[in-house]
């Protein structure tokens, strides 16, 4: 496996109101594998859930009713701007997520509002599952949230947790780390196999 350094990827994260689970923030990060996190293109949108924000949600995310009133955008605006960014950066067809559900939940919510959004398809790249598989293969513990898992792979979590754009950026950074490690491992394996493959000998004819 060779990592395509010329392909851009998009990581997606959602923040929800704790009780109703309605989406209140959409965050993305877009980057190429070799870019530093400080060079990632990030964006977040606040969305009005049509109800007061739970106090537990505010404690977790810092998002308040005042924030929603001041900065929330219509779903049509969010979908249009997100679509434009996907096209502009020509991102990989499937989004990168920490855990499953964010992309399908977002697509479902957009569809319910009869908004055009021809992106993501039916699949996503779940880095949490990727991590679990790696840990199972190594006989190690599979538990942990994004911050602790990044620590296990030697990557510090940057920024405030439970901010959708920040979570997306850290998810993307972990994806590149795991993708790069796998590519290096595969390259080493292929080199070792090539070195130890018996060379075919040819008998000369007389």
Image: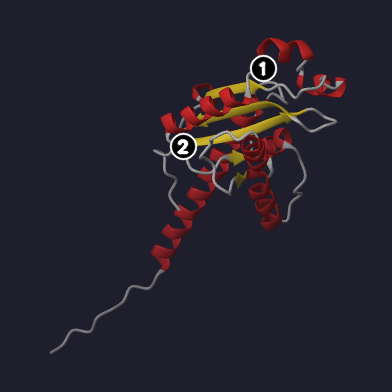
* Residue 126 spot, x, y in % from top left: 63, 45
Q: Which numbered disc flags the more N-terminal residue, 2 or 1?
A: 1
Furthest-front residue in this view: 114
- Dot 1, how many residues are within 10 Å of its Cα: few (below 14), some (14-19), or many (20+)? some
Quadrant of the rendered structure where residue 25 is? top right
Mark number displayed over residue 72: 1
190 to 156, vertically: above or below: below
- From the viewer's side, name the closer residue of 34 and 120: 120
Q: Which residue is mark 2?
A: 91
User: Is residue 205 found left or right of 134 in the rendered image?
Assistant: left
Quadrant of the rendered structure where residue 151 is? top right
- From the viewer's side, name the closer residue of 36 and 84: 84
Spatial separation of the CA atoms under disc 2 and disc 1: 25 Å
Element assignment for label 2: loop
User: Is residue 19 found left or right of 6 in the rendered image?
Assistant: right
Give the residue at x 63% y 21%: 74
Furthest-left residue in this view: 206
Give the residue at x 46% y 37%: 91
- Dot 2, how many residues are within 10 Å of its Cα: few (below 14), some (14-19), or many (20+)? some
Report the mark closest to the observer, 2 or 1: 1
Element assignment for label 1: loop
* Quadrant where the image shows the C terminus: bottom left
User: Is residue 24 found left or right of 19 in the rendered image?
Assistant: left
Give the residue at x 57% y 33%: 115
- From the viewer's side, name the closer residue of 147 and 125: 125
Furthest-bottom residue in this view: 206
* Residue 165 spot, x, y in % from top left: 62, 25
- From the viewer's side, name the closer residue of 118 and 112: 112
* Residue 101 spot, x, y in % from top left: 69, 43
- Colouring convention used in this rendered image of the protein: secondary structure
Mark number displayed over residue 2: none
* Residue 49 spot, x, y in % from top left: 75, 24
């Amino acid at each position: 496996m060779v990592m395509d350094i010329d392909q851009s990827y998009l990581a997606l994260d959602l923040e929800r109101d704790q009780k109703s689970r309605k989406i209140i923030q959409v965050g993305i990060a877009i980057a190429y594998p070799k870019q530093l996190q400080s060079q990632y293109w990030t964006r977040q949108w606040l969305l009005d859930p049509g109800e007061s924000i739970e106090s537990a949600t505010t404690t977790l995310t810092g998002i308040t009713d005042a924030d929603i009133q001041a900065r929330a955008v219509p779903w049509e605006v969010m979908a249009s701007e997100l679509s434009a960014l996907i096209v502009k950066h020509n991102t990989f067809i499937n989004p990168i997520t920490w855990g499953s559900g964010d992309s399908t939940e977002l697509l479902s919510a957009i569809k319910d509002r009869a908004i055009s959004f021809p992106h993501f398809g039916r699949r996503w790249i779940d880095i949490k599952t990727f991590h679990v598989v790696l840990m199972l293969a190594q006989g190690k513990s599979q538990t942990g949230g994004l911050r602790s898992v990044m620590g296990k792979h030697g990557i510090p979590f940057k920024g405030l947790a439970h901010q959708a754009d920040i979570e997306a950026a850290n998810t993307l950074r972990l994806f590149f780390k795991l993708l790069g490690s796998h590519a290096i491992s595969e390259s080493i394996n292929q080199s070792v196999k090539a070195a130890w493959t018996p060379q075919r000998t040819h008998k000369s004819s007389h």
